[in-house]
Amino acid sequence: MTRSKWKKLCLRLVLISSSALFTVVAVELGYRVYMFGWGALSPTEMHSLHRLGQSGLLQRSPHAGLRYEHKPNLDTRYHMQPFATNSMGMRDKEYSLTAPPDTFRIAVVGDSWTMGSAVAIEDVYHSVIESRLDERGKSTTYELLNFGVAGYELWDYAGTIEHKVQQFHPDLILVALSGTDQGVRKRGYPRFVEGPELNTFWTLTLIEDFKIYRRNTAYRRNTAYQNLASKAPRAKQRAGQRTEGAQAKNSGSPKPQALRRSWASGQKLLAPPVMSYLRETFSELARLRDQSEVPLVVCFLTMGHNPKGRVTQAFAKVCAENELPYRDTGSPFKGHVSREFWVFRDDHHPNREAHAMFADVVLEFLEEGGFLPQ
């Protein structure tokens, strides 16, 4: 091959490679803007979208029963919002251990929905409630302390109350549940191991999201249905779609179709292993309430109006069994699609508007229940 032909071939390869690279970059940047807005073009903002375990925001907790906690005195950004913690690792301002005179103190315990993921701290529902109460100009000052940490679950809530909340001597404890609190997990496990901090600006978001989608799909098809295996016989009986021989053959794990039929046919409680887990953890919350002699109330933060749904019915049942006042926040969302209130297109955390609606319901709940000073 002559030198001129080599030059032409190399030039073509360079042009093809450059075109492919340009296409990949253009598609990636377009996808980022579509998913997160124009702020995704900023390296700083895009870097703030890292996963929690690779965010550098967490440390292993020294307390038994808590897997991890926020690092104290942070001043950074997380999911495109300022993220600062006080000396106790709370995403909140500094508080003295003893409340000032004429102050009613509420400890708010929860996960990322309470921490405020991708939402400014002043727009999170408990901050909105605090502002509304203080604006009334009464002699009582209100403090709502934010003990929310992303990824926390029921056992973490109990550990937070036992090891952190009680030292602040609150007048009321508000436990805020989310839809992830139905997952069964042993107390204190798995132990937290921080991954290497990842700069997400230099990763292909489209590829990462596709991996997450595949992982979540596999989870829904396998783990979720296996956790509800005990519903399979009833689901098959009610559906009446399988012969007796087929039922015997498939009596192991339930099929997705059978589970969908069982949900549609009116089975409103979660599987026995899940209900047992909820009873165990809520019993611990009630024990801590009795031990501290501080009232404890429970709210289920949800952006779906489904008062007869399996999850809210299960939460209501175990709360009633332990004499814990309970309210779900779904009523203002009737007639809406939950996607309207997501912070990002692929992030189901509530946005600013949803938090304001949570505040309406929670504040009404606290007032109607007589949990606030008159």
Image (cartoon, rainbow, N blue to C red):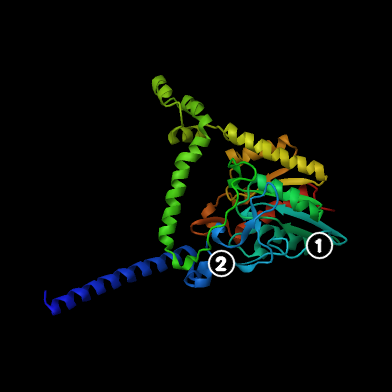
> Marks 2 and 1, how far apart in space?
29 Å
* The image quarter in which residue 273 lies: top right
| Residue occupying image coordinates x 53% and y 29% | 230
Report if residue 269 is visible in the image: no
Q: Nearer the viewer, residue 152 or 172?
A: 152
Q: Secondary structure at mark 1?
A: loop
Q: Closer to the N terminus: mark 2 or mark 1?
A: 2
Q: Nearer the viewer, residue 301 or 158?
A: 158
Residue 80 is labelled as 2
Q: Is residue 93 above or below residue 305?
A: below
Q: Is residue 2 above or below residue 325?
A: below
Q: Nearer the viewer, mark 2 or mark 1?
A: 1
Q: Are marks 2 and 1 in contact (CB under 8 Å)?
A: no
Report if residue 216 is visible in the image: yes
Q: Is residue 244 above or below residue 137?
A: above
Please indicate whether residue 83 sits to the left or right of residue 218 in the image.
Answer: right
Q: Residues within 10 Å of mark 2 (few under 14, many from 20)?
A: many
Residue linked to disc 1 = 96
Q: Secondary structure at mark 2?
A: loop
| Residue occupying image coordinates x 58% and y 60% | 351
- Where residue 214 appears, x then y in whole percent? 42, 49
Q: Amino acid at mark 1?
A: Ser
- Where residue 264 appears, x then y in whole percent? 50, 35
Q: Amino acid at mark 2?
A: Met
- Where residue 213 appears, x then y in whole percent? 44, 51
Q: Nearer the viewer, residue 86 or 110?
A: 86
Q: Residue furthest bottom?
A: 4
